[in-house]
Amino acid sequence: MTHLGSESHAGVYRYDDVDRQFVFERVEQFRGQVARRLAGTLSEDEFKPLRLMNGLYHQLHGYMLRIAIPYGVLTSRQMHRLARIARIYDRGYGHFTTRQNLQFNWIKLAEAPDILRELAEVDMHAIQTSGNCVRNVTTDQFAGAAADEVVDPRVYAEIMRQWSTLNPEFSYLPRKFKIAITGSLTDRAAIEVHDVGLRAKRGPDGAVGFEVFVGGGLGRTPFIGKPLRDWLPEADLLAYLDAILRVYNQWGRRDNIYKARIKILVHELGLPALRERVEQEFAQIRGPRYRLDPEIVAAINDHFAAPPFAEAAVSVSGSLDRHPELPAFGHWLETSITAHRQPGYAGVTISLKPIGGIPGDLTADQMDAVADLAARYSFGELRVSHAQNLVLPHVREDALFDLWQALGPIGLATANVGLISDIIACPGLDYCSLANTRSIPLAQQIGARFSGPGEQQNIGDLSIKISGCINACGHHHVGNIGILGVDKHGVETFQITIGGKVGTGAALGAVIGPAVAFDQVATVVENLVAVYLEQRQAGEPFVDTVARIGTRPFSEKVYGIAA
Amino acid sequence: MASKAITANRVQDGVTIWVGPDENWVERIADAAVFDDVSAETVLRAVKARGGTGFVVDPYVIEVTTNREGPFPVRYREQIRARGPSVRSDLGLAIDRRPA
Ligand code: HEM
Ligand code: SF4
């Protein structure tokens, strides 16, 4: 892979020949390893680290392949390829995750090299989707499109991708390392729950710099990221990240897997001491030899040039026909549209949360259909959001009605983005070998309870997040309502928290009382919502009501009735 | 004494399997052999030793009861492995149902 400092051949998916050759060689290397495993000359113990380096996990039903979608950006061509893989090599569907990755659950080891080859042909791979390295950098799903964007975060996500990919110094960190970046006023990338969170912003002279958070993360010991630095000049981005990773590499704990993430180091050292070490390291390596060349940044910036927006679209801006005769379209518009920086355009979120469906799952046919729609309506570009939805980033306002009509028949016009049934759920016990409990069926049950006309709209903004174990892949700690599966003597039970949130001013939820049984969860959620509807003030979302009145009224309602 | 079966996943395609009556691997738990605690551990050791490098991934012992069709797992986790995801009954047994 091309690294910065040598020549700059950035490019999202527009790999150069060296990149391409590298990925193909890597596939063939893996093919050899698989052949040796199948022949029995490699044991599972020997083979496991090799397959994990290529994104191949062993889960409840066999092999699972995790495919990187760098900063969540996909082309129509790539989406078509994913559809083809789902159809030919898997069981006709794939699962989009909160990490802006895609997982296939029914992979045959013997075919894994062919799949990786198919991916390589469209400049995709599964490298660094596992292991104690810097993982896929995630960002705002509306990057390059949002009206409130100050700096395009894709540029820096791409720079970090090049810097981190196969970086030998950071291949054996104490534990995995996740970086998220936003460049907007509204943080849609959840930067405060990542190992490092970056907010790109502009100084008084317009120069780009970063606010740096460190030590955020969920899992067993959740922490909100702490402010490490208020302003990091663009030129120092990589030197400073290097400094953080070096300090972590040296001082992060390797004796206990549960204490190995950087959040624990931050917690044990304290922020000032950590900052001092980082600044010391940074002082040694920064400087003329290690700075991000503005020319490189400019070259990468060019790769993210805006698509050829139509002048004609501007003239219809703001005069969108809402088709009042079709209220369903109005509902969909209300939840699915995000303001675009280009007049006459909109960002469209496609909900992957149909009522009663599986959050994040998409069939091969839907993948093909949505890839075609992206080609037709969004310059061939798609995004994956950390809320397990898809985004068409650049849609003309005067095409929204046609798009909506096309989404309906393929089951992708659910008008619930940001509402109570737009639930994040980890795979849980239905797929995951680490799970205590199921989580998908709860999402289905809860969605069904609030499916009456107008019910969700009346409740308004409310996020439910479900994890099937303490690893917190479903981000339950930061759900307005968080649901965590715990195993009580072999019985699935669920701990409920309220008041968590992500984005600017992220907060962890508070436990409302003893864990409840599988069958009670949806009723508990109904009770929580009932208290909110009773108590809310005008315009107050659920999470603000919790902040104002505390958890007690909620606990009383839930346990008063459930007991 | 609790009834036991031995499960794993097949190396080449990941399919969930159980040790059958003649110590061959079977793809339906109803066809699995049932062992007592002691013999289950013995067979597990033999499975792990087989071929040195082994031809299955992650073999282990599970608890089973016996119903009309044959042995069935006690724990919910193992029931899901045997039947496939609870949310995708269309996928049926954990055998290859890839569309033709
Ligand atoms: C089914 C296979 C999966 C396995 C075995 C798995 C395993 C894990 C483990 C062990 C951790 C904790 C790591 C640590 O704290 O050091 C973790 C964290 C995480 N996983 Fe997964 N995961 C799986 C699927 C997913 C899926 C499908 C998603 C997205 C929907 C996801 C998103 C995450 C996220 C966001 C975290 C970080 C939570 C944090 O901040 O600590 N994972 N996963
Ligand atoms: S939270 Fe636990 S159950 Fe859910 S996917 Fe992660 S590891 Fe599996």
Image (tube, rainbow, N blue to C red):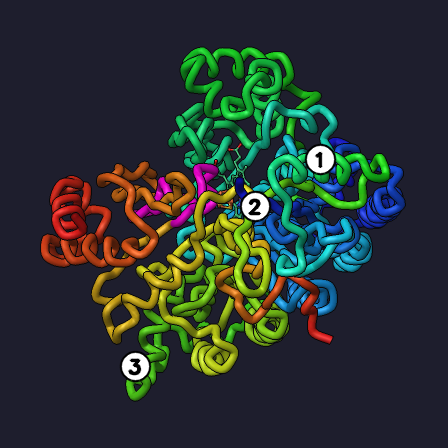
Q: Which residue matches tag 2?
A: B3
Task: Report in which chain the residue with disc 1 lies.
Answer: B
Answer whether residue A468 is magenta in the image: yes
C-alpha gap between disc 1 and disc 2: 14 Å
Q: Is mark 2 on a helix, strand or loop?
A: strand
Check chain identity for marks 3 and 1: say if they share one. no
Left or right relative to A451: residue A213: right
Badge 3 amino acid:
Pro
Mark 3, residue position = A327
The chain under label 2 reads B
Residue A50 appearing in the image: no
The residue carrying pointer 3 sits among few (fewer than 14), some (14 to 19) or many (20 or more) residues within 10 Å by Cα, namely few
Residues at marks 3 and 1 touching, judged by CB atoms closer than 8 Å? no
Distance in Å between CA atoms under marks 3 and 2: 59 Å
Residue A372 position, x and y percent, is 62, 75
A451 relative to A288, above or below: below
Q: In this view, does A162 lie above or below A71?
A: above
Q: Which amino acid does label 1 sit on?
A: Thr
Q: A222 above or below A405? A: above
From the viewer's perspective, is A397 left or right of A559? right
Image coords of residue B93 (percent x, y): 61, 64
Is disc 2 surrounded by few (<14), some (14 to 19) or many (20+) residues within 10 Å? some
**As rendered, which of A451 and B16 lies closer to the eye?**
B16
Per the image, the residue denoted by label 1 is B42
Residue visible at 50% across and 31% down in the picture: A195
Q: Is residue A412 shown above or below A525?
A: below
**Residue B62 vs residue A104, the one in the foreground:** B62
User: Marks 3/1: CA distance?
Assistant: 66 Å
Residue drawn at 32 percent across, 69 percent down? A334
